[in-house]
Amino acid sequence: MPSAPTPVTPDFSGLWIPLVTPFRDGAVDHAALAALAERLAVTGIAGFVVCGSTGEAAALDADEQLAVLATVARPAPALPRIMGLCGYHLGKTVAWTRRLNDEDLAGLLVPAPSYIRPSQDGLRAWFEAIAQASAGPVLIYDIPYRTGATIARETLLALAADPRIRGIKDCGGDMAKTRALITDGRLQILAGEDPQLFSTVAEGGAGAIAASAHLQTEDFVHVIRSLRTGRLDEARARWQPLLALIELLFAEPNPGPLKAAMAQRGWLQDELRAPMTRASQTLRERLQAEQTGLSRR
Ligand SMILES: O=C(O)C1=N[C@H](C(=O)O)C[C@H](O)C1
């Protein structure tokens, strides 16, 4: 049986959960967040991503983001935490990066600046300025459908030469680009599009940051471990039953459907901050039926 790939340092392999931020009556529900972190911490995950897009970070102010980070750290202090950044103002983002140097973080997850669509040279300068300000490693968050900026393969390969930039959360939707990065070998590739988790890890990706893995977490952990140790049949057997759930969770903007499904399990209130909205009634019903089916398996 093939052995697992040799880990690189720092090791970002495995399954990372981009935590939702639970709300109750408009405020962050820290009790629900702490209970969620506690529940997930024992499932075999690599760690948490705090304040990613699933965490509705764009709707949280700086104090709320720091409070969320502190709450997540409490139940499992030894479990690594990656902090998400978002924005488009370089000076403010660099200043926030410096503030985050005071926190105990495994890394920063940094998207391209939203809305302004800089050139490839501008994108490179953006990531390098943030990496330079960061005390810890940086993972590039490549998500053109949210930011409006496509990071070209050549730009990513150029950024890979920076020793502070260690990985990528890949939502680029371009498998040829993903393969080029895997072949290049300098960045650790984490699948960020949940349906692509299997193919990315099977082709040599290090793991995933997958919102849908809030649910059926052990199955997702098992899929990644099986793929990384060459147990393809085992991985496929765990993966295929997850596909319908994943499809439903992204049938409307994330994290609406995910929060609906989690609320059905009694884990949080089905509440989002505007302009994000709850999943539609029809989708909520389909999620309920799918979850009932999974619980009978
Ligand atoms: O917050 C994240 O990290 C993720 N975001 C993606 C998105 O909604 O854009 C989805 C992915 O599962 C994790």
Image (cartoon, rainbow, N blue to C red):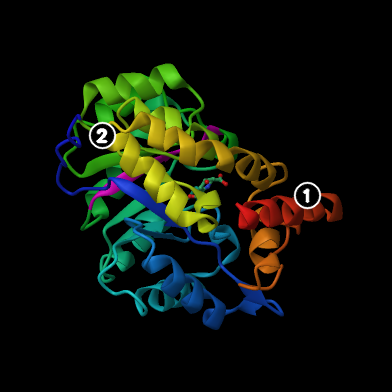
* Residue 163 in the image, given as x and y percentages of width and height: 16, 40
Q: The residue tagged with tag 1: helix, strand or loop? A: helix
Q: Is mark 1 within 8 Å of ligand 1?
A: no
Residue at 34% over, 25% down: 203
- Span of residues in magenta: 137-144
Which sits earlier in the primary sequence, circle 2 or circle 1? 2
User: Callout 2, which amino acid?
Assistant: Leu
Q: How many marks?
A: 2
Residue 122 in sight here: no
Residue at 33% over, 39% down: 226
Dot 1 corresponds to which residue?
A: 286
Q: In the rendered view, would you say 149 is above or below 283? A: above
294 falls in the magenta region:
no
* Quarter occupied by residue 244: top right
Residue 129 or residue 24, whichever sits in front:
24
User: Callout 1, which amino acid?
Assistant: Arg
Other-residue count near label 1 (Cα within 10 Å), few / some / many at <14 / 14–19 / ≥20: some
* Residue 191 in the image, given as x and y percentages of width and height: 42, 37
Dot 2 corresponds to which residue?
A: 187
Residue at 51% over, 32% down: 149
Residue 59 in sight here: yes
- Report the magenta stretch's main SS: strand
* Residue 221 in the image, given as x and y percentages of width and height: 39, 50
Residue 258 or residue 228, whichever sits in front:
228
Residue at 19% over, 29% down: 2
How far separated are the C-alphas under marks 2 and 1? 38 Å
